[in-house]
Image (cartoon, rainbow, N blue to C red):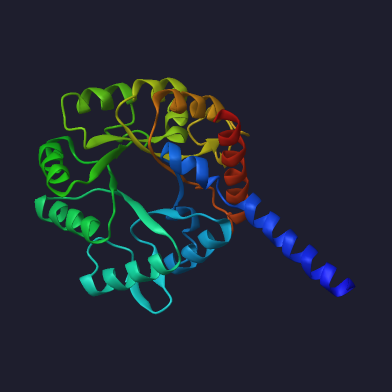
Amino acid sequence: MRSLVGIINLLLMVFLLSVSAAPNSGKAEKTKWQLGIQSCTFHRSTFVQTLDKMQKLGLKNVEVYFGQNLGDGFIGTMEYKIDITTQQKLLKLVKSKGITIVACGVVICENKAEWDQLFKFAKSMGIKTITSEPAPDQLDYVEKLAEKYDIDVAIHNHPKPSTYWNVDDLIKILKGRSSRLGVCADIGHWTRMGIDPLEAVKKSEGRLKSFHFKDIVENSSDSRDTIWGKGVCKVDAIFKELKRQNFKGLFSIEYESQKESPDADVKQCINYFNDRFAKIF
């Protein structure tokens, strides 16, 4: 009898741990908020190892970055130029783990042929959003491909000297363009550039496609990442603003601090998201 009680208690403990670790998927799915991870967060691991880490963390959405070693029998790195056979094998593996490749980037192409190849790769892999920083003179062609393939292009805001570091300039550039083109808001980079991230999110209303979501320790250009809610990026206020905007899209956890294993910090970011989401909604 004691052994049976022990087994029941153990199973209950495992269940409770799994619930606390997993994203608040029920409500989030209804509001179309997708919590995922930028795979560069685990850049010291292979892509296959990243998938395993995601399973343990309860994450089901990934934004892949190009250059990560594939691992586990796959040759080379994650690239939009990988052959179709490798694409199909990767997609099969990802799906078998209950994970979806939602986005890819940040990617910059040199010419039309590369843009064509990138969009074909995204379509083949079921990717809905390409995160990019196209040269301004490429935007017409990128816009044409976005419409052709029904794929969003979220323009990212790397710090200076990126063309798109200033939110005001970015919004002006997007004015009058297809709704397929929008903003991938990196609130950490805005804060590092002295831009109020909450005000930038407000200015981006109607164009927000996705986030490289992070928090940073202080208002400085070289400030390191920290766990969500412990820094200066006004994370809680941004969540509330996004509810007001009826935002629908991806929050890619991007933890760039050079840690051998950021898993524990990522888990705390997930827990923070779950807690704030439950309170806001």
Number of marks in the rendered image: 0
Instruction: Look at 19% across and 46% down and name the residue there.
Output: 150
* Front in this rendered view, residue 219 or 149: 149
138 over 208 or under it: above or below: below
Looking at the rendering, in which quadrant would you find the C terminus?
Answer: top right
* Front in this rendered view, residue 6 or 80: 6
* Front in this rendered view, residue 129 or 277: 277
- Seen as rendered, the residue at the extreme bottom is 73
Using residue 234 as the reference point, say whether residue 204 is left or right of it: left
Looking at the rendering, in which quadrant would you find the N terminus?
Answer: bottom right
Using residue 96 as the reference point, say whether residue 58 is left or right of it: right
- Seen as rendered, the residue at the extreme front is 1
Instruction: Look at 16% across and 24% down and name the residue there.
Output: 176
Q: Position of residue 260 (x, y in %)?
A: 58, 59
Q: Position of residue 209 (x, y in %)?
A: 33, 37
249 over 8 or under it: above or below: above
Instruction: Look at 41% across and 54% down and name the residue there.
Output: 62
Image quarter for residue 95?
bottom left
Q: Position of residue 247 (x, y in %)?
A: 39, 31
Q: Position of residue 216 (x, y in %)?
A: 55, 35
Can residue 196 be seen here? Answer: no
Using residue 265 as the reference point, say whether residue 222 is left or right of it: left
